[in-house]
Amino acid sequence: MLSIKALKANVEDKPILNGLDLEVKPGEVHAIMGPNGSGKSTLAHILAGRDGYEVTGGTVTFKGEDLLALEPEERAHQGVFLAMQYPVELPGINNMVFLREAMNANRIARGEAPIDAVNFMKQVRAKAHLLQLDEKLLKRNVNSGFSGGEKKRNEILQMLMLEPNLAILDETDSGLDIDALRIVAEGVNALRSPERSIILVTHYQRLLDYIKPDFVHVLSAGRIVRSGDKDLALELEEKGYGWLEEETAA
Amino acid sequence: MISQEARRDWFEQLLQQGTTAAAEIDEQAWLSRRRSQARAELGQLPLPTRKSENWRYTLLDGLLGQTFQPSNEAFQALLPEDIDDWLLEDTHAYRIVFANGRFVPGLKSFAELPEGVTIASLQQVLRQQPEMLSIWFGQTANHSQDVFTALNSALMNDGLFVHLARDTILDRPLEVLHLNLSVEQTALIQPCNLLVLEQGARAEIIERYTSTGDSVYFHNGVSEILLEEDASLTHLRVQEESPQSYHLHRSFVSQAAGSHYHSTSVALGAKWARQELQVRFQAENAECQTRGLYLVGKDQFSEQHLDVQHNTPANSSQHLYKGILYGACRAVFDGRILVGQAAQKSEAHLNNHNLLLSREADVVTKPQLEIYADDVQCSHGTTVGQLETEQLYYLRSRGIKLIEAMKMLCSGFAAEIFADMKNEVLRERVQNRLDTILVRALDETSGEKHV
């Protein structure tokens, strides 16, 4: 599904990714862990198509196509979704209107008919309920005055509505208390299927108690320095990132 | 640059030509007096130039370089189907239509009105109940202040007259369509409107200024709005005139104790537009809330003037204006609130925000607060910005196309202005119009890098 080969990227002429390789097959859940500044969020944004990153080498193919050649909206149409670490507020744009616009933009791009209002409402209600997201938040402007946890849940709501093929969650667990974390994890687990892949970018092992990854990768200085199964996450939790960095340096 | 002499001639000439047009009204003595005063003052008042603070940022050469003839034509033959395109559907409003500032009797939508309500043309009232006018007329609009007001007063011949007697409630909104058309010549159109709400009266008035095609004309309008004790007026105003037209409109609002004036105005059209609002509180506990949106594109000039004076205690005024500039254009916001020494316990807030979508857009923003009382709550602020890259990225990452994302953010920016617009038919129409203009403009400029 997703194939990243020797990816190198700069931010303001500073190299952040230094030859990153990653293969994600349909149905797999990959966790990417690593210390601050190792390039985790940069990777997430490069995949989603944010401006300001200069790819200096390597390739990213998604479903056999060059992902980097696509505009952010085209990537969404192909089924890429990024749950952001810091979702922005959109003043004056109603959350429900936004969700419907987004859904229909994707459907139209894929040659499907727009969703009708009744169906849409039914789906939003059911999914907001699953995430225990107050329905009042649906009527507010996007993320305006939402708490940190509400913003994260609103991201997951969008993900559930858009049903992406590749969902990237950028530190969705940060700032969530244990109950909110469980709810969000349930939401993500609800999306798991043999056709769908998930990349969890996280700093802590905690999230992985609830969403069991198939693979765990450790990112350090812009490269994946170690890959393993979920036990690797536990090891990291115990020892910290220091030992890996030392090992890599050695 | 147009010479001082040429400027004087410009007014002189209009005055000369206007004489015949105005003479058809059977004059009352007070009106003739008023007219000749205005005429005399017109010759003496300072002419608008970039040197006076009030006209400093206004581009005047286009207007003063163009010749106009006072519009004499009364479009009596207009039929309802001629104005279909401009009508609001499903508002159930009382409707009255003016073409080039003149009342069109055949297009009035009502035969009867609730007791205590008068909705008519100025000419009708001058013929039938002139004494009614003499009480109210010219109370707030001072023609000795400015040449354009003097020009309007000197040649005044028609306009909207609304009067609500004490405690009368207008049961449906009043829709006023001001349709401007220049058929053979470039017309000077000068409606003179008078709205009087007596004690405790309430009304909602929707005024729409619109025109056919690319008509070239100069609309120089004056509205006087008198709100007596506890009267309440919701005033919606939409200006969507021809892209070749010049539109100057002045509203003078006088508020008695406990009165409410809520105004939402949207300026979308005209080549050159300047809208002025003057508010005077006469007593205590009155409230004034204005919301304004201006959308300015290629080759347009759009200006908002606000002049609010709190000279009595415990009044509240809140003013929020937003502008979206989407091409090589200029917009001016010049707002001033004066809180005088006697105006303790006043509340006054003045805000202006501008969104620039083009590198060639030029905005002048000048919110001013002058406070001489010490126990007041006042604030003012202004911003000029562009679309936020992060917000665009967020929308696009959800599959929404760039142009659509830009449009959504612009509409979101403007949404606050419509938040209090309870008339949904009008709100939807204006928002759709806004969307259409924005999408077209954004499509055209998509080559330009916006962010």
Image (tube, rainbow, N blue to C red):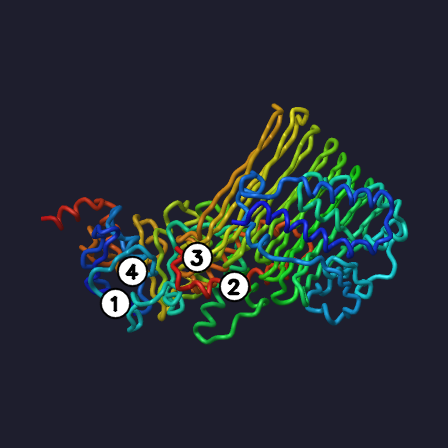
The amino acid marked with disc number 1 is: Ser
| Whole-percent x, y for residue A187 in the image | 43, 58
Amino acid type of disc 4?
A: His
Q: Is residue A243 left or right of residue B70?
A: left
**Residue B192 appears at what percent x and percent y?**
75, 50
Q: Nearer the viewer, mark 4 or mark 2?
A: 2
The residue identified by callout 3 is A156
The chain that hosts pointer 2 is A
Location of mark 1 (residue): A3
Whether residues under marks 4 and 1 lie with C-beta atoms below 8 angstroms apart, the answer is: no
Of pointers 3 and 2, the one earlier in the residue sequence: 2
- Mark 3–mark 2 distance (CA, rounded to whole Å): 15 Å
The circle drawn on residue A100 is 2
**Amino acid of disc 2:** Arg
Indicate which label's residue lies in the foreground, 1 or 2: 2
Marks 1 and 2, how far apart in space?
A: 31 Å
Of label 4 and label 2, which has the lower sequence position? 4
- Mark 4 belongs to chain: A
| Lower position in the chain sequence, tag 4 or tag 1 | 1
Q: Secondary structure at mark 3?
A: helix
Labels 1 and 2: the sequence-earlier one: 1
Residues B33 and A93: in front is: B33
